[in-house]
Amino acid sequence: MTPSEVKATLAFSDGSPTMELPIYKGSIGPDVIDIRKLYAQTGKFTYDPGFLSTASCNSTITYIDGDKGELLYRGYPIEQLAVSCDYLETCYLLLHGELPNASQKADFEHRVMHHTMVHEQMQHFLRGFRRDAHPMAVMTGLVGAMSAFYHDSTDINNPEHREIAAIRLIAKMPTLVAMAYKYTIGQPYIYPKNDLSYAGNFMRMMFATPCEDYHPNEVLVRAMDRIFTLHADHEQNASTSTVRLCGSSGTNPFAAIAAGVACLWGPAHGGANEACLNMLADIQNQGGVAKIGEFIKQVKDKNSGVKLMGFGHRVYKNYDPRAKLMRETCHEVLGELGLQNDPMFKLAMELEKIALEDEYFVARKLYPNVDFYSGIVQRAIGIPVPLFTAIFALARTVGWIAQLNEMIGDPEYKIGRPRQLFVGAVSRDVKPIGQR
């Protein structure tokens, strides 16, 4: 952080003394006002529900400019990374700060791909869940349980422990997601095959069966790899902030990541692409493309309670840069699988067309977001809708780890402890039960 020569002066209309607050400049983005001494000097806190105007940390990992529609991982635009790098290169970048050279890439890939198996007892752990459990319910349990199986890497203050925990989590998340899927459909688990790519191995564990050979389709593998890359990190969102807050207590990395998985489950966060596909299914059940005008009319009516899922974004007030890339992948996958005329996909493309042309949506900048396209791609690949959020968690794991490790290495980090504006009852006495 670079201190600014300019200071902010806080003045009070009740005659309390003014206070000078330091201002810090980032390398890009808004300046921040340092309020750490505010309570000590004035006896007052700030009030910022949802922390929409509060920087909770300083970070060098991911930068978003929502007005420009810009997303940078360690300074590299997402548009370049998604085209020129694969997911494991992106993981290396997020963890280490620089893209790997050829030997670093080979070494990192070897380490990750040789930690893909999970402890055999994890299979027995799965049997405690009902077969119809939501995959995210299963994933919160499995990821949290990893600390019981890999307790030789749970010391958050030991750099070697953090390093091996990072490798284990990145390597084993695809195995756990595939196991959760296979369990719900009653098929046998497929063990990892380390000579495949990260995404190819995941596709095989998802869709192979012991009774026949499985050869991953390279177009679909590339699409899955891009989904992973586009979701790898997204600055201080709800689940990342949860991981940081959980990790600030000194808990082990597996517990912190499990907390992130639980937070991501919410329909306003990682569940958005699941909600989007459910919305498309509802329109389809009501008559499909023929009824789309009626649906749009309801969306525009504030009193209808009907929401347009998969459009607009809390941060991006411009086109989501990830959506442009995912749109390309979406059309590539639909073309490869010959699904351009599938009723659900025709409906999705018609909805996209309306949103990009209708003045109501254009004026409100309700562009299709990454969830809209990634949901369509995953459905085309054959991934069931309830599993979408688990795949998001798989992809975001590296971002959570990078953010957690950065926080632990920050000399200014403290256990998280937000304050409150208390508006409840003041101190009062307990009356005997007969007088209440």
Image: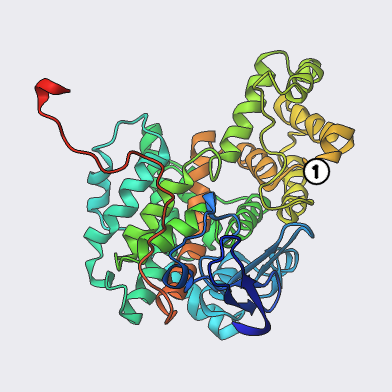
Element type at marker 1?
loop
Q: Of the residues shown, which amino acid type is indicated by label 1? A: Lys
Residue 184: image location, x then y, percent: 38, 34
- Image coordinates for residue 107, horizontal then vertical, percent: 49, 80
Q: Foreground: 239 or 6? A: 6
**Front-lying residue, 22 or 387:** 22
Coordinates of residue 371 in the picture (x, y in percent) = 65, 44
268 with respect to 117 (left or right):
right
Q: Quadrant of residue 431?
A: top left
Location of the N terminus (image quadrant): bottom right
How many marks can you see? Answer: 1
Residue reaching furthest to the top:
286
Is 338 drawn above or below residue 253 in the view shown?
above
Q: Where is residue 75 in the image (x, y as percent from the top left)?
A: 68, 75
Residue 358's place in the image compared with 315, above or below, is: above
Q: Is residue 167 above or below residue 324?
A: below
Which residue is at 36% across, 54% downward?
258
Query: Compared to 278, does 266 lie above or below?
Result: below
Look at 65% across and 74% down and name the residue there: 8
In depth, the one of 199 and 162 nearer the eye is: 162
Would residue 240 appear left or right of 100 to someone viewing this image? left
- In what quadrant of the picture does the C terminus appear? top left
Identified at 58% across, 57% down, the residue is 228
Residue 372: quarter of image: top right
Coloring basis for residues: rainbow
Q: Mark 1 points at which residue?
A: 365
- Front-most of 178 and 92? 92
Residue at image coords 75%, 64%: 79
Q: Quick check: can you spot residue 60?
A: no
Residue 160 position by quadrant: bottom left
Q: Can residue 320 be seen in this view?
A: yes
